Amino acid sequence: MNIKLKIGILSGILLLLLLIAAGTFMQISKPADTLEHQIVQLAGYERNMLYVRGTVYRYGAAGAHIPSSVIGALSKYEPTLVAVEYAAEKYMEKDTALRSRLSGYFTSARSINAEFTTLINDYNQLGAAKPKPFDEKKVETIEKLIGTHVNDFDAVSGALESVAVRYRKQAAILSGILISVTWLLGLFVTWTLV
């Protein structure tokens, strides 16, 4: 067999094996990327909650009606919770700690949304010339819920991060195995062509 043909076949096989190993690694590392993306989405949701909280209290201190855009901001990020819940569903099946933390987080987030909506609607008093003062009990309830929610967010982000780290470790181990197998197959192909 011609030496140039052997080198061409060997190069083609090695390139194919390396591409297979790279593609497999990309598929293996995808769960960790997905989980990290969920942390980013939840952080965006938390920023929105801070915006709403600050806006509500700012308008309350000024004694002005709270615009409907604030309630719109609350509902705007509700699909984020649904998306995170859907994306993390298959990981929650495998990890009970993640499932319980996400469940607590979603419950507290939705209850805060409902409480803020009620507070804003009560404050604005549809058609009234001047807004009604905040109900102190509702504000205290919301602040307690927010305190719990912040702890839930810390727990969720920690759980998502630990699961992502676990998937990254699995990906690193499997990629090491793939690289070794690719190298051994390359040696075998070289040995058979010589």
Image (cartoon, helix red, strand yellow):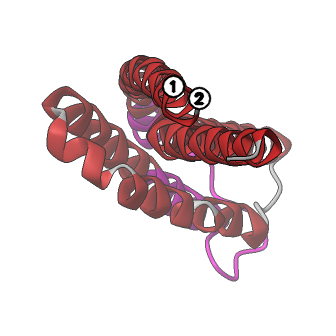
Determine contact: label 2, label 1, CB under 8 Å.
Answer: yes
Identify residue for label 1.
191
Circle 2: element type: loop
Q: Is residue 55 left or right of residue 77?
A: right
What residue is drawn where x is 80% and y is 49%? 63
What residue is drawn where x is 73% and y is 40%? 11
Residue 128 visible in this rendered orientation of the protein: yes
Magenta region: 113-142
As for residue 120 lying within the magenta part, the answer is: yes
> Label 1 amino acid?
Trp
Residue in front for this viewpoint, 15 or 53 = 15
Whole-percent x and y of residue 2?
A: 75, 46
Residue in front for this viewpoint, 57 or 137 = 57
Whole-percent x and y of residue 25?
A: 53, 37
The C terminus sits in image quarter: top right
Counting the numbered discs, the total is 2
As for residue 146 lying within the magenta part, the answer is: no
- Check the image and report above or below for 118 versus 92: below
Q: Is residue 152 left or right of residue 94?
A: right
Density class for disc 1 (Cα within 10 Å; few <14, some 14-19, many ≥20) is few
By secondary structure, the bulk of the magenta-drawn segment is best described as helix
> Label 2 amino acid?
Val
What residue is drawn where x is 39% and y is 25%? 174
Q: CA distance from mark 2 to mark 1?
A: 5 Å
Circle 1: element type: helix
Which numbered marker is on residue 194? 2
Give residue 164's quadrant in the image: top left
Residue in front for this viewpoint, 17 or 135 = 17
Whole-percent x and y of residue 68?
A: 73, 71
